[in-house]
Amino acid sequence: MNWFGRLAANALTCALCFSYSQASFGQQAPAAILPDKEEDYYRLLTLPIPQGTILEIGGMATLPNGSLMVCTRRGEVWNISNTTGPGMPVYKKFASGMHEALWLAYKNGDVYVTQRSELTRLRDTDGDGRADSYDKVYSWPISGNYHEYAYGPMFMPDGNMRVTLNLSWIGKGASLTKWRGWMLEITPDGKMTPIAAGLRSPAGFMMNAAGDVFYSENQGDWVGSGRITHLEKGDFAGNPASLRWSGEPGSPVKLTPADIPDTGEPMFDVAKRVPGLKPPAIWLPYGIMGKSTSELLNDYTGGKFGPFEGQLFVGDQTQSKIMRVALEKVNGVYQGVLFPFREGFSSGILRMVWGHDGSLFAGMTSRGWSAVGKEEYGLQRLVWTGAMPFEMKTVRAMPDGFEIEFTQPVDRAIAADPASYAITGFTYKYHSTYGSPVINNAACPVLGVVVSQDGMKARIVADSIRMGYIHEIKAEGVRSAKGKPLLHNFGYYTLNSIPAGEKLKITAVRPAIAHHAGMQGMPAKTPAQKPAVAVPSAKRVIAQPVSWGKAEADYTVVIGTKPGLKFDQAVFYVKAGSRVKLVFNNNDDMQHNLVIVQPGTAIEVGELGMKMGLLGEKNNYVPQTPKVLYHTNLLGPGTKETIYFTAPTKSGDYPYECSVPGHFYVMQGIMKVLN
Amino acid sequence: MKLFTFLLFFLLTATCAVAQQDAAYTPVLLTGPNSFKPLPANWKLVSEVFFNPLADGDPVLKNGTGVLVNIPAKNKKWNEGHLLTNMEHGDLDLDLDLMMAKGSNSGIYLQGRYEVRLSDSWGKQDPDYTDAGGIYKREANTEGAEGRPPAQNVSRAPGLWQHMQIVFRAPRFNAEGKKTENARLVKVIYNGVTIQENIELSGPTTGGIASDETAMAPLMFQGDHGQVALRNIRYRVPPANTEPVRRASAVVNPILVSPGVAPVVHRGFLNYNGKKLTAPVAVGYPQKVSYAYDLDKGRLLEVWRGDFLDATGMWYSRGEQQLAVALGSLIVLPGKPTLAFLPGKDSVWPDSNTAAYNYLGYDLLKDGSPVFKYQLGDAMIRETLTPDNSGKRFTHSISAEMAKEAKDLWFRVAEGSDIALQPGGLYAVNDKQYYIQLPEKVKPLIRKTAANTTEMLLPVTIKDQKGGVNYELVW
């Protein structure tokens, strides 16, 4: 290596050292190393948007000249140049007047968008930077239901286009007009072929390098948790509302609604006896790994975006973050692992595209649904700093467990210790009910670990691995060779198939250590299912107490919801010690609960509920704490519950909230107790 | 004959004072206790009036009853010739049809004292307090004192029947006769649009019957300025206000769509005749005229004058209705397809061309106007609706390209209760709701429909594989 190379190498090492451990810079002892942050590796930049331009991004594409072409929920298309600076980005309106454009593609100089009822081609015939022709490529009937969103087109190699159609919403998913809940293929001259059914909220879909198509799904009715499914022609992805049209000419889907059992068994098990039902390749555990899975973006940047070339980035609209998926094919079936990647975006992520420099642009909007990021809309850019994060790069299924590959060499002794890991298997119910609690969760004791010579891989042999189950893999104990903890120390592997091959011979069977063998935030569980709590709780009394006799409650309060994570009443008044009958009517299209807490503890209780992790749903997201006074159960959309309680004897402002993770920050009211 | 029917029906039930509490309107008659004071000479009773919207000239009258027309004498005196009711009113809900002559102005004086302006304000972009629906200034001798323009100018062409409803609240006095509350214009609704709401009147207008204020007084129609026609005048005591008080938590900032210097094209859901349409397009022009066209069926739905759209229902929160609402004064059209192939002259115009109609898209002209493109059978059609600079008329035109010979392609111009040729060459449609102007020497086919309405058709002649037709909607 010449002197320049050595200089560069040294500079790089210094830079890495600096960014790795600022606390230890100049210190003697290798004391407490400050944990890495995501922003040390991926910088989040915000693009300014002119005031008055309501850039609620529905679709995005990068143009050959590097500009972004963006369409919005208000039906506009904007050409944004100079997106990477220096200087301000320049916004030029390309088109307008369309009905809710939720996807944009660019091909051969034309812009393609989907409106509510139409796949439209926009063409600038006179070169003045504005579209002059708004031509219909294909249109489909709609009923006027607000939930009937449309996404596409995605261009296939043969020039045809793929489009997906949201279900209608009538208190539950429905397919009010033809092809709602389907993926369609449309030729450039407007001939349509239906491809697959069973979709509910298919906002994101992509084709990988192998030519396989995947789509993302949102938790809801028949969808226990978010998921990503490999969709092939003739597949049924799970929600039966769209099967209404499976008998139409040209339909490759043979199932009818009557073929789909509503038992609450795991989807993987049902799929064994219902051919055509396609289980997902990746499950995204609700509340922990997002709530509204949106865009799917393959990393084909050739390494410009870090060490995850070939992997899949997944956006989430509610939790304003990006997750990372590594897929593999085992016995011909897609499956793989899901990791956290980057949070902190300013609004709800709906779209993601690559800039020519390998930076990632996130197009965002949250209007109507609320998101962790508080802005109503936005456009941000994620740039790799060039530094290597210490991460689990990928996890592969093994005949007897899993193999983790790291981005950097690990401390081999620690990595070889089973106590550094914890694996738990679980799944969800497949049923018409909205969402699902985690079910059948059980620890998978780690029997032994073999670490590769170069320290880059750890092959974990574990017991009780179940095919068809999601496996939470925690590696909290693992350290890099330099002593750093993982930037993200857990992932979720969806195990649709177990590879054949040689199992490792593990001689010493180490006992599972109780405090590591549990799921996030909860104590260890035995493989046997814990019985549901049947003991009546003093905090949730759902029938008028006998001690009240026949008398009416002193106060009857009816609380409902408003869109955007709000109760329809911000405050109500009761006298101290009075008898209160509270009816909570969840008229929203997602789950909520109502929890009354001690003064000043709304956020604290909500965060305790979040810490319940995967078991939160089963426990109605109500943590065990004296800060919780009274609560309803977790209610699905369109259901209500009445609770009876005696108001506190001490006057004050007692908050009530929905303690579903993320909701409690904004969904609050005050019960004012007066003397 | 309308008047006699009213007389027979209501003579026994009408009373002098406006004290009724029931919701039905009472008509103002020509004779009897519920009538006008003796008509001054300039006011005549006729059955029909023609005012030429485009040229100055004398009105054309038709003998009969039902319409009161004011034609001031050439040597008219100021403040003479007003029309007054026998009845005296306090609070009043007044409802009537009115028709202006070209360049004319008049006024409705509540209690003979407070004027709401009537005026030919057709095509005026920035109305002032002297324009139609304006509240004229107070008597005080200060410039424009408390004169208030209408919120929108929704005036139609002279010679067309327009509609106004005025809800008036009289001043209140205490036992000593001292005024405790100002008179108020609760609402003025002109051609279906609320153009004044909750405006206090601190005192009478000039030119009324008195300068003082009182609890009860007659209603007055100004007769000394310009030609105006009135009909279907009726009134009642305003019903109790049942509008809910706006709750603080229910406040939503409206999201309005307005054209700037170029027209705005807007796709969204629209209510039309009680049904939610899912493929209409609304186009709004800077001249403050707009129309809605249904891309699903190739038909013109409605036109309106005034502000463009309220899109709150589409863009606030989830937009659960996804409905846009027209803000101006609507003329709702019958909504049949513009074109059809009619095998014979007696073939019924279809409600929809279904399989033959295939929407293709729209192009934008240099000025931003859309040109709708569609196939109808073997014909390739381009259809536009564009206003003139003043916004007084729309030109509705189609061009057709067809390889084959076609003798049966027709263009439907209008449908209404009647279509009547007026002096000067305009056709008045639907009891003078709007006019049609055809190009020179074009003879339309006017025929009755199965529903006993009248429709006007023009043939589309295809020569050298091309054809075109147009007309002007003047309103």
Image: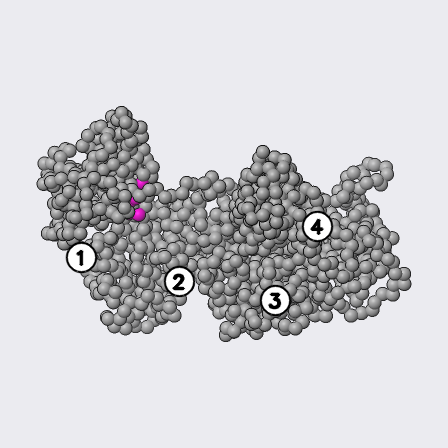
Label 3 CA crowd tier, 10 Å (few <14, some 14–19, many 20+): some
Give me the disc on residue A262.
3
Q: Nearer the viewer, residue A155 or A98?
A: A98
Element marked by disc 2: loop
Tell me the amino acid under the disc marked 4: Met
Residue type at mark 1 is Leu
Q: Which residues are magenta?
A: B187-192
Tell me the element at label 4. Answer: loop
Marks 4/3: CA distance? 28 Å
Q: Residue drawn at (20%, 32%), measured in percent from left and top?
A: B208
- Kindly indicate whether the residues beneath marks 4 and 1 are on one polypeptide chain: no
| A171 with respect to B282 (left or right) | right
For marks 4 and 3, the one nearer the N-term is 3
Within-10-Å neighbours for mark 2: few <14, some 14–19, many 20+ = many
Q: Chain of mark 1?
A: B
- Observer-side mark, 2 or 4, equals 4
Label disc, if present, on residue A25 of the rendered structure: none
Helix, strand or loop at label 3? It is loop
Inter-mark Cα distance, 2 to 1: 33 Å
Which of marks 1 and 2 precedes in the sequence? 2
Which subunit holds the residue at mark 2?
A: B
Q: Which corner quadrant of the image does residue B269 belong to?
A: bottom left
Q: Element under label 1?
A: strand
Q: In 3D space, how far apart are the residues under numbered discs 2 and 4 (Cα atoms)?
A: 52 Å
The dot on residue A612 is 4
> Residue sitting at 32 percent across and 35 percent down?
B199
